[in-house]
Image (cartoon, rainbow, N blue to C red):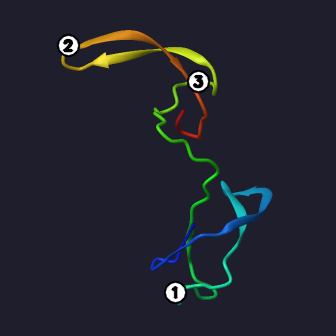
Amino acid sequence: SINTRNDLIEGQVSRINPMVQNGNIEVEVTLPKSLPASARPELNIEGKVSIDKLSSALFIDKPVGAKPYSEATLYLVDKEKQQARAIQVHYGAETSQHI
């Protein structure tokens, strides 16, 4: 979705530039034929690309060495009892910061 600061416009990714520049990847988006009045040439916008949607998913900050779709032992902390116990977890998909 494209945020013009006044409206959100849904688009479709039409091209992904294979080159990374300053940690960014350029993406071309095909927009609908009818655009809101807030969409103008040379407008600074913000975009969000959604690749997939997971419902009822839990996620955590990615532990060092965590691999997607694998199993691991983590420690679940009970703050009231001031105890930690080992639990077996099954990782799913990952992002750059979460799993």
Mark identifier at residue 81? 2
Can you say which quadrant of the picture contains the C terminus?
A: top right
Can you say which quadrant of the picture contains the N terminus?
A: bottom right
Identity of the residue furthest to the left in this view = 80
Q: Secondary structure at mark 2?
A: loop
Q: Is residue 75 above or below residue 97?
A: above
Mark identifier at residue 38? 1
Residue at 59% of width from left, 29% of height from top? 92
Neighbour class for label 1 at 10 Å: few (<14), some, many (≥20)? few
Mark identifier at residue 51? none
Q: Is residue 43 above or below residue 8?
A: below
Where residue 80 sits in the image (x, y, percent)? 18, 18
The amino acid marked with disc number 3 is: Ala
Residue at 61% of width from left, 58% of height from top? 49
Where residue 14 sits in the image (x, y, percent)? 77, 66
Q: Which residue is mark 3?
A: 66
56 or 20: nearer the viewer: 56
